[in-house]
Image (cartoon, rainbow, N blue to C red):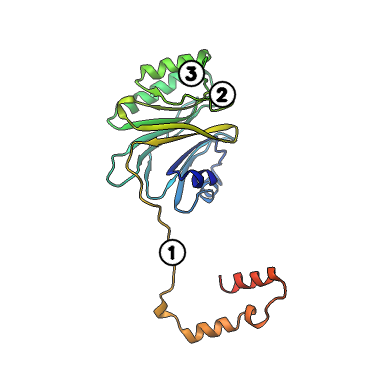
Amino acid sequence: MEHIDSLRLDMLAITESWLTAGTGDAVIRAACPPGYTAMHRPRPSTGGGVAFIFKNTIDVQRLDDIVNDTFESLNLLVATHRTSQPFQLLIVYRPPSTPVQHFMSEFSSIVEPILASARRVLIIGDFNLHVGVNPDGPGRKFLDLIESLGLVQLVHAPTRKARLIDLVLARASDRLVDDLVVSQRLSDHNAIQCLLNVSRPQRPFTTVSFRPYSRIDIEQFAADLSSLPLIQQPADDLDDLVRQYDEGIA
């Protein structure tokens, strides 16, 4: 994905992925740059869904799926290096149609046990609750809730038009987020870019297949090359020449 390549991201969380249970795995992996892989959790019906793309040198374990009525999530344990302690990452998408009070009740009951662990915790996603400048009533109630949970909301710029609805939540004592900026626009939301206080991942690896030179029959190889249409009957058109090269040699 261009966003990953241009910003040299190690990880990318996505909400409203619109991936399906049937084809989602193939679609998300096809979208990954070389050296990256992905996990996702689709919505049973159309739309929604959450996904996570990451370097294949990062150890990501999928924890038990959280079952509830008001938001979608992907619950992960992430270790960016083999020598580093993992942190828990919860990616959230709350559809705007879900009742706010019911959501806050479910969110609180689900997050409290997570925060009771000794792990560092990062909760991110699209909550569809405006908590920025002049927050609405539901936004104020949600800010009160996360404060009561010991969490800090770290995004301070609008993420969708004039509204701040895409959030990054963490405990101040965890010191997990070193820096955060609201960056370029993706779809109808602005992206949030975080610098985490974790060990730097190793460079991604790729698998390369090759034939040992010592096992090549040079005479037979030369004969095979000589018999190619590119040699025997080269095309007059440049595009056809390129096709002959691709089919015969590349």
Residue at 56% x, 70% y is 250
* Tag nearer the camera, 1 or 2: 1
**Alpha carbons under labels 1 and 2: distance apart:** 46 Å
Seen in the picture, residue 31 relative to 213 is either above or below; the reply is above
Residue 71: x, y in percent?
Answer: 49, 27
How many residues crowd around disc 1 within 10 Å: few (fewer than 14), some, or many (20 or more)? few
Q: Is residue 157 left or right of residue 62?
A: right
Dot 3 or dot 1: first in sequence order is: 3
> Which residue is under mark 1?
208
Kind of element beneath mark 2: loop
Dot 1 or dot 2: first in sequence order is: 2
* Tag nearer the camera, 3 or 1: 1
User: Three-letter amino acid code at disc 3?
Assistant: His
Residue farthest along the bottom direction in this orientation: 219
> Which residue is under mark 3?
102
**Alpha carbons under labels 3 and 1: distance apart:** 51 Å
> Which residue is under mark 2?
96
Q: Is residue 128 left or right of residue 87?
A: right
Seen in the picture, residue 81 relative to 157 is either above or below; the reply is below
Q: Are marks 3 and 2 in contact (CB under 8 Å)?
A: no
